Image: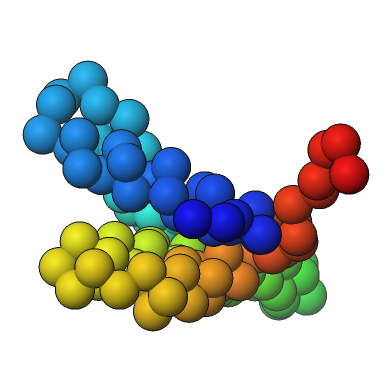
């Protein structure tokens, strides 16, 4: 097997750790748990920042209309950005799981690598799409 891209190496490393996933101390189990927790926190922060301006308006009666729109715009922008990042990370997580399932069940590495490549794109991991540097050429 010849690896020409960085994401291929990452995928095969992830595939090896996926096959050893039954161990609670395994690398895949820890990565999956951290990824799910980070997705949950991103979702909560995104929704929190979207709801926060309205809570500020209810709690602070002295806030005039101009300042409220500044607070509303700032916090809504942060909330929407965090929510968009959540969506891209969630799609990346789904593509990673689908790639691993396809590699295990169908033993089709080409389709699995294509799915994992899309996962890297949605995770904004563009450095993984570069070719590997060959030492000693």
Spot occupied by residue 84 in the image (x, y as percentages of width and height): 55, 73
Q: Furthest residue to the right?
A: 137
52 versus 119 height, above or below = above
Q: How many marks?
A: 0
Location of residue 55 (image quadrant): bottom left
Q: For this rendering, which residue is in front, 111 or 69?
A: 111
Spot occupied by residue 18 in the image (x, y as percentages of width and height): 25, 44
Location of residue 32 (image quadrant): top left
Q: For this rendering, which residue is in front, 102 or 58?
A: 102
Q: Is residue 74 left or right of residue 90?
A: right
Residue at image location 32% in from the left, 41% down from the top: 16
Q: Furthest residue to the front?
A: 137
Query: Which corner quadrant holds the C terminus?
Result: top right
Spot occupied by residue 57 in the image (x, y as percentages of width and height): 53, 65
Q: Is residue 102 left or right of residue 109?
A: left
Residue at image location 14% in from the left, 68% down from the top: 105
Spot occupied by residue 5 in the image (x, y as percentages of width and height): 66, 59
Q: For this rendering, which residue is in front, 113 or 124?
A: 113
Q: Is residue 130 left or right of residue 79?
A: right
47 versus 69 height, above or below = above
Q: For this rendering, which residue is in front, 112 or 57?
A: 112
User: Does residue 25 show up?
Assistant: yes
User: Does residue 60 show up?
Assistant: no
């Amino acid at each position: 097997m010849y690896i020409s891209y960085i994401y291929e190496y990452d995928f095969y490393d992830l595939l090896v750790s996926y096959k050893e996933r039954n161990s609670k101390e395994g690398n895949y189990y820890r990565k999956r748990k951290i990824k799910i927790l980070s997705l949950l926190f991103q979702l909560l922060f995104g929704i929190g920042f979207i709801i926060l301006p309205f809570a500020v308006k209810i709690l602070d009666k002295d806030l005039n209309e101009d300042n409220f729109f500044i607070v509303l715009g700032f916090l809504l922008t942060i909330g929407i950005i965090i929510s968009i990042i959540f969506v891209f990370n969630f799609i990346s997580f789904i593509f990673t799981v689908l790639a691993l399932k396809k590699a295990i069940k169908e033993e089709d590495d080409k389709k699995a690598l294509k799915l994992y490549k899309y996962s890297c794109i949605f995770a904004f991991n563009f450095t993984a799409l570069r070719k590997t540097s060959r030492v000693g050429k």
